[in-house]
Image (cartoon, rainbow, N blue to C red):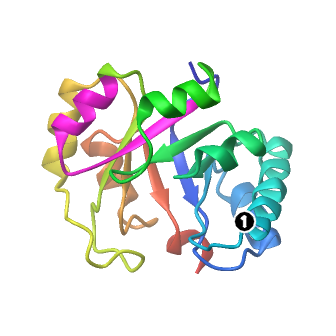
Amino acid sequence: MCNKKISGIYAITPNKKLDINLIEQAVVKYKVSILQYRHKIDNEDTKLNEALKLRQLCLRHNTLFIINDDINLAQKVKADGVHLGKSDASIMQAKDQLGDNAVIGVSCYNNINIALDAQKQGVNYVAFGALFTSNTKPNAPKCSLDVIKQARQSLNIPIVGIGGVNFNNQQQALEAGCNAVAMINALFE
């Protein structure tokens, strides 16, 4: 099981060339507990280089380091785990490749059944969203805070709220039952 709690602010890197100093400032200033590397580019060398720098940053600040989608990259940089979406590899594949100590998270969008199935398969946390209007994914399906409240009653693993979360509305997500809130623009734009 993950040795660090899935709670507080879950930072996701912006989908562009990384400003490591900006990311480090945000990690320190906002006491970020989890950092997810998410950069949708095809250049494997760039991804490896950025991920290695972020891994070191996370080790310095005792922050959980998660790679979005890419189990191979997570394995190469010895990340703490991986976050999987609906079109990514299976939970079992991630467990087989990364080992039992890896932190595995799954996107559940607005579907509690996906979350219940993921929990049965032994994931460490589930993410629901978009909770609010998101600039990063404006067409993402909406997930009401009522879904979070229902999920909280059915699940015994942490819930991460994502999508348009910022410092003005994060409390609503936490009060609905989220253990952590994911932010991109609120931290880095």
- Quarter of the figure with the C terminus: bottom right
**Residue situated in front as seen by the camera: 124 or 33:** 124
> Would residue 116 be counted in the magenta stretch?
yes
Residue that appears at 82% across and 42% down: 59
* Relative image position of residue 60 (x, y in whole percent): 86, 45
Vertical order, 138 against 52 (above or below): below
Q: Is residue 186 left or right of residue 121?
A: right
* Relative image position of residue 46 (x, y in whole percent): 77, 70
Q: Which residues are magenta?
A: 103-119
Q: Is residue 64 left or right of residue 49?
A: left
Q: Is residue 138 left or right of residue 62?
A: left
Residue 33 visible, this orientation: no
- Quarter of the figure with the N terminus: top right
User: Where is residue 180, by image quadrant?
Assistant: top left
* Relative image position of residue 186 (x, y in whole percent): 51, 72
Q: Is residue 184 left or right of residue 19?
A: left
Look at label 1 and name its amino acid. Answer: Glu
